[in-house]
Each structure stands twice: as C-alpha cells, then as structure tokens.
C-alpha cells in the first residue's frame, strides 16, 4: 500500500513537474535569445528573423518604445487571431513564452565584446539558435512567426517552412532597401547560422537515415540485422518492372552513426545489393523516435 501511495503521489506531481520543466526550457531559451538581440544584434545594428526582426526594424526607425514592449504589442493581435487555429496547450505555453521573452529583452543587457561584424553575426546565430532550439523543445514557443505559420498552415495549407521562408525573404529585402545591403547580408548570415544551430538543438545529433535494401540475399541480411544490431526491419514484397521477377525490399530506419556498420554488413553478404539511403527528418517511435513534442 505504501508503494502504491508513492506511485499515486508521483502521478499527481507529474503535471506540475512537467510545467516546471517547460517553464525552465522557455526561460533559459528566452534569456539566450535576448542576449543575442541586446548583446550583439542591436549594438551591431543587425536585424533578426521573424517577429524579432520586425521588432528591430520598428525600433531602429522609431526608437521611442523599447524592443521588449514592441515585441509584446505586435504579438497580442496575433494571439487573438490564432486562438481558433492553435492547440490550447501550445497556445498557453506560447503566451507564456511571449511574456518571458519580452521580459528577457527588457532585463538582459549584457553586451558581447566582438567587434568583427562577420564574427558577430555568426556568434549571434549560435546563441540565438541555441535559445530558439531550447524553447522549441518545450511544449510552446516564443510566439511570433511560429503562431503565424500555424495559422496560415491551417487556413491556406501553407507549409510552415514556406511561411518562414517567405516572411524572412521579405524582411531581408525590406532591410536592404531601407537600411543597407550590408545589413541585410549580415542578417542573412545570422539567420542561416541560427537555423542550423536550432535544428541541431531540436533534433539532436542523432539524425536518422532510412535504408532500402534490394538483394537476392535478403533473408540473410535481414537475419544479420536483427541478430547483430537488434534493429527493426520491414520486408516489403515487390516486383521488378523489367523481368517481372518477385523481389523483397528491406526497409529500416537507423541512427546516422550506425550507417557505416550496416553498409559493411550488406557488402559482406551481397556486394551486388542495391541500397538506397535517404535522410529522415522526424521519426515517431519508442526506440528511434526524435519527433519534437510540440
């Protein structure tokens, strides 16, 4: 009974602990993003991606309100519009993320001592990408372009990446026309580095590969994969188009670091095997799953 009571108590505590963990992710990520903005982007007069970039444009043109308040004000109408399009949990956590990021912009004012503009753009991308990735590992976001992308996806079936690309492309063109081409190019470098680091933080180092194997020795290859690597394999029945012969295709999803070992195994059993390896963005599953929870 005592053991059962501990289990029940832990189950009751789990939602609260999950909330604290997500709050920690959003707060730490927001602090890093605010450090990149106030410590590098604003001193160097660079822009940023998404609604942070819009915030900086307004701030540079009309330096009356602080960036923290501008970011908050331009996001509020978006939340009213997005109420019917965004999941309630994501919506609540994103509102929390917006408030925390705005507060971080107001409070974090530590200038990073880097004078070279290229190095500044790259370092800002690393810091901001790390912060954005940490936030996106939570159940919410820092609002802005994330909310807009979801709205357009559900309303007009636009892909999330397409919305981001279009929005940031217009932002860079506007920056080049209003400010300077140099500022737009430095911002482009910042956005690129930030996106790469963010992907690394969100997806992790354990990238997945999808492997398709066509071989007459498919049974032996399948047995070896299951026996040595303890990795799942799916057998797909197929038919060759030229001769009409029955074929068996082995389908498996593996971690990137396991690919060389698998290729050696296939080459040892059947050097003439036809193997196709493709990148896999996300995987849902107990062992190899790497899909973000948001």
Image (cartoon, rainbow, N blue to C red):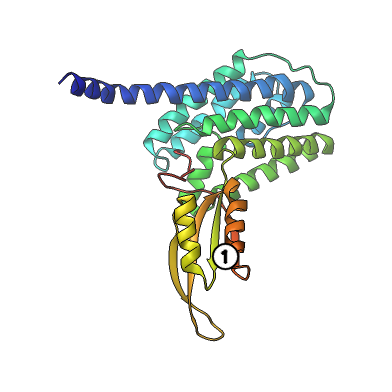
Task: Look at the picture and state if 61 lies above or below 78.
Answer: above
Disc 1: which residue: 269
Q: As rendered, which of 175 and 293 lies closer to the eye?
A: 293
Q: Residue 119's x, y, as percent?
A: 80, 28
Left or right of residue 50: residue 152: left
Q: Residue 222's x, y, as percent?
A: 47, 62
Left or right of residue 281: residue 116: right
Task: Look at the picture and state if 137 lies above or below 229.
Answer: above
Residue 51 location, quadrant? top right
Q: Residue 99's x, y, as percent?
A: 50, 22
* Element marked by disc 1: helix
**Residue 142 visible in the snapshot:** no
Residue 49 location, quadrant? top right
Q: As rendered, which of 84 and 100 lies closer to the eye?
A: 100
Q: Residue 95's x, y, as percent?
A: 46, 28
Task: Look at the picture and state if 244 lies above or below 108.
Answer: below
Residue 183 location, quadrant? top right
Q: Give me the residue at 82% from left, 31% from top.
A: 118
The quarter in which the C terminus is drawn is: top left
**Residue 195 visible in the snapshot:** yes
Q: Give me the residue at 59% from left, 69% from top.
A: 273
Which class describes the residues within 10 Å of circle 1: few (<14), some (14-19), or many (20+)? Answer: some
């Amino acid at each position: 009974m005592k053991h059962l009571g501990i289990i029940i108590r832990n189950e009751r505590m789990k939602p609260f602990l999950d909330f604290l963990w997500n709050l920690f992710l959003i707060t730490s990520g927001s602090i890093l993003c605010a450090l990149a903005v106030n410590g590098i982007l604003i001193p160097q007069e660079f822009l940023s991606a998404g609604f942070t970039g819009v915030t900086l444009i307004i701030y540079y043109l009309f330096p009356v309100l602080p960036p923290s308040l501008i970011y908050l004000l331009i996001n509020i109408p978006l939340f009213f519009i997005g109420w019917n399009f965004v999941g309630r949990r994501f919506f609540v956590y994103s509102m929390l993320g917006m408030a925390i990021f705005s507060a971080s912009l107001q409070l974090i004012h530590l200038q990073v001592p880097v004078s070279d503009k290229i190095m500044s753009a790259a370092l800002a991308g690393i810091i901001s990408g790390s912060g954005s990735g940490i936030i996106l590992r939570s159940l919410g976001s820092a609002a802005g372009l994330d909310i807009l992308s979801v709205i357009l996806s559900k309303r007009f079936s636009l892909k999330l990446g397409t919305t981001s690309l279009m929005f940031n492309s217009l932002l860079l063109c506007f920056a080049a026309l209003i400010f300077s081409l140099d500022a737009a190019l430095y911002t482009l470098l910042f956005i690129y580095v930030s996106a790469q680091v963010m992907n690394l933080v969100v997806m992790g180092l354990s990238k997945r590969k999808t492997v398709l194997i066509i071989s007459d020795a498919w049974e032996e290859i399948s047995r070896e994969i299951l026996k040595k690597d303890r990795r799942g394999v799916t057998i797909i029945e197929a038919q060759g188009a030229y001769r009409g012969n029955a074929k068996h295709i082995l389908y498996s999803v593996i971690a990137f670091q396991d690919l060389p070992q698998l290729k050696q195994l296939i080459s040892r059993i059947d050097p003439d095997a036809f193997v196709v390896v493709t990148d896999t963005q996300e995987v849902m599953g107990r062992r190899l799953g790497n899909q973000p929870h948001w």
